[in-house]
Amino acid sequence: MKNEYNFNDLTFLVCIKGRKHCTDRLVNYINTIDTKLNFFFADGSELHQREIINKVSKNHNVNYEKFEYDKDFDSFIKKIYLSLKKIKTKFFCFWDTDDFLNIEKVFFHLEFLKNNTDYVCSIGKIVNFNLVDNSSIELIGDQYSGQKTSDFKKKFVFDDFSCWEALHHTEKMLKILKPVSEAKFNDIRNISSAINQYFQILGKMNYSTDGIFILRQANTSLYSTYDIEKNTSSSKLQSKVRLVSVWKVLNILKSYKIYKIILSESNFQKKHKLFLSYYVYYFKNLIKFNIINDLKKIIIFLRGKIVLNNTKLKTKNFYKIQNEEENSFYKSCQQMASFGNLKNV
């Protein structure tokens, strides 16, 4: 993959925890990129992965640091915060080890942020895939649909907009991560809520459907039921009803803590509007995504049925390649997708 773009103002932050097979594949992919890139590898594995990172081409600028083991989300966020303090570029982008980033689209979002100073982050289309028989990519669906811009200051309405994988201003992310890491939420939902809503208050957020930004393998988390031996991205049958509404209701006190953080860090002057917007959004999602879904689970359970949460099931949401540009990126990832000899990972 040969590119002639200038990425001097951007650092890719790669957070590592276990999954050596993913790290090894990522390094192989990085080494196909001729354009000089800046990397900071933050290793929170139980055992270090320095030997894999040492394989990264000398063409790239690489910084590696071993952190304490990511035993929970608090240590994970602390690792990110400490890593960002050492990143010197104006912009940064997270790069998960199970992702294929489209470098051409990364450059598009980098230039967008440089030329549109009222935007705090920019993100593109993220398409999930299954790896079938450790060889072929089966595209599932994109995480969002439709071009959009989040502009809280204009509408005073929070959008369902996850900005985690976007290109960010390094200093802006540092500012919110400090109080978030000190709050010790130890729950990714609270952490992501604080970050997403903070950035919506701070400025505009851009989501572009112009090409695939990230191809992401489904269910490779250490906490998922990913079968490394069979290399199949699927979940197991769940015989228990897992309800999240109870957590959401009990989480109201923590939600107020999030509200206080984003109010303090954003210096938003219209406190009453912010408070109202925040809790309208909170209870709307509680009803829409949690209570209704939990009622469906209860009904299904009472009928004696078990639902298989399997991304390989037949679905109308399979992603279709839009144009030749997307097809070219897809094919290049297809060639890099296998994990090699799984017995050695």
Image (tube, rainbow, N blue to C red):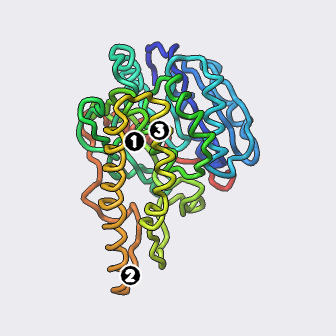
Q: Amino acid at mark 1?
A: Ser
Q: CA distance from mark 3 to mark 1?
A: 9 Å
Q: Relative to 45, is 58 above or below?
A: above
> From the viewer's perspective, is residue 78 above or below residue 202?
below
- Side of 200 relative to 209 (left or right): right
User: Residue at 69% across / 29% down in the picture?
Assistant: 64
Q: Residue at horizontal 46%, vertical 71%?
A: 242
Q: Is residue 281 above or below residue 214?
A: below
Residue at point 33%, 73% (across, down): 295
Asked whether the beta carbons under mark 3 and mark 2 sit within 8 Å of each other, the answer is no
Q: Is residue 323 left or right of residue 17?
A: left
Residue marked by disc 3: 195
Return the residue at label 2.
301
Q: Which of the 4 quarters of the picture holds residue 327?
A: top left
Residue 260 place in picture, x, y as percent: 48, 40
Can you tell which of label 3 and label 2 is closer to the viewer? 3
- Left of 58 or right of it: where is 289? left
* Residue of label 1: 162
Q: Earlier in the sequence, mark 2 or mark 1?
A: 1
Label 2 – label 1 distance at C-alpha: 31 Å
What type is the residue that disc 2 sits on?
Phe
